[in-house]
Image (cartoon, grey):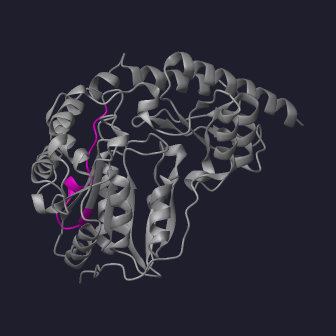
Amino acid sequence: MSKPIHKSSKLANVCYDIRGPVLDKARQMEEDGHKIIKLNIGNLAVFGFDAPDEIVQDMIRNLPSAAGYTDSKGLFAPRRAVVHYTQEKGITGVTVDDVYLGNGASELIAMSMNALLDAGDEVLVPAPDYPLWTASVSLSGGTPVHYLCDEGAEWYPDLDDIRRKITPATRAIVIINPNNPTGALYPEPLLRELVEIARQHKLIVFADEIYDKTLYDGNVHTSIASLADDVFFVTFNGLSKNYRACGYRAGWMVVSGNKRQGRDYIEGLNMLASMRLCANTPGQLAVQTALGGYQSIKDLVAPQGRLTRQRDLAYERMSAIPGVSVVKPKAALYMFPRLDPKVYPIQDDQQFAYELLAEEKVLIVQGTGFNWTQPDHFRLVFLPNTDDLGQALDRIERFLAGYRKRHSV
């Protein structure tokens, strides 16, 4: 018997603070004239990654006709382009009516949780995670339950830990693949096991695939929704990362698989889409051109492409620092180094990030900011050009050397 899926009836009184003392300190230092090397956010434009010119020109040409509201789910042509993209990814049974365009995938993630959760409902979210997922679950009245990803197994989800944490209140599981913050890419056999868990427990699978083209070393991405048609899937993607268009706020959400199981939930999504009237029209106009045009991301992730060279530089330099280990990213824009607690006895990793900023003017995000359980990791963004990135890594190496000296027994 299918587990019912229904729309949210309550909104929790939750405030998600994305600032904190480290970012406040960075802003103050910049106001005081200091130059900060920012390795804290995947905002590609500030590092010289421009959106493809054909997208820019197409938006400019169509802007005079973009002043009106669109259909609440979005314009037909870009939604049809998304349907074609799902077909390329092997996801079957998707129609234009199954596609929702949004102001980036972020808006749609929040919408997807609002439509689903009531007080007491639980959602399985990875640890470490992209923290918007945890925040959206909490804000929508649900309870995020974090399942562990195993650093010793290339940061793959721990299937046994997932099984242990499923309860009668569990409604869904979030899969972030390719993964932020670890750069992991999940192989098809693992994805099939995750599908089987969802099948057995009648869970919705929320698949965050925003980095599905940012792949290194010839790796291939498999959309989890392509692996079954008897499980209900909600898949997220957009232009922010693969097409370097973060500020365009152009994303999409696709429902697929066992849509009969999700019938009431889809009704809730439709209501919420109508309430926000529509996504921004100029951003929608970029989608069809982006998906149908030259995929310049392939040049950036080629063996001598800029992103690959920067990833390799960061990986090699971080791996060479005493007491630091890191799993080499197969995808995305990040790595998640581990600081051996015997070498770096960190008690408060936010304070660690604060001290790195104050001493070396390098901004990172502490691992607990991604709902990791121990203060022994941080996320490093490898988007700066090799000169700036090399300088940042020099500063991190110098800071860690001083930290080891100060805390040596």
Q: Main secondary structure of the magenta part?
A: loop
Instruction: Examine the rendering and report whether any part of residue 339 can be seen.
Output: no
Which residue: 36% across, 58% down? 107
Residue 190 screen position, x and y as percent: 35, 51
Q: Which residues are magenta?
A: 219-233
Which residue: 32% across, 48% down? 209
Question: In terms of image quadrants, where is residue 54?
Answer: top left
Q: Residue furthest right?
A: 409
Instruction: Examine the rendering and report whether any part of residue 402 can be seen.
Output: yes
Residue 161 screen position, x and y as percent: 50, 63
Q: Is residue 296 above or below residue 175?
A: above
Residue 62 screen position, x and y as percent: 15, 39
Residue 290 versus residue 219: which sits nearer the camera? 290
Q: Is residue 221 magenta?
A: yes
Instruction: Specify whether 151 is left or right of 117.
Output: right
Q: Is residue 80 magenta?
A: no
Q: Is residue 150 above or below residue 302?
A: below
Q: Which quadrant would the C terminus be assigned to in this image?
A: top right
Residue 166 screen position, x and y as percent: 44, 73
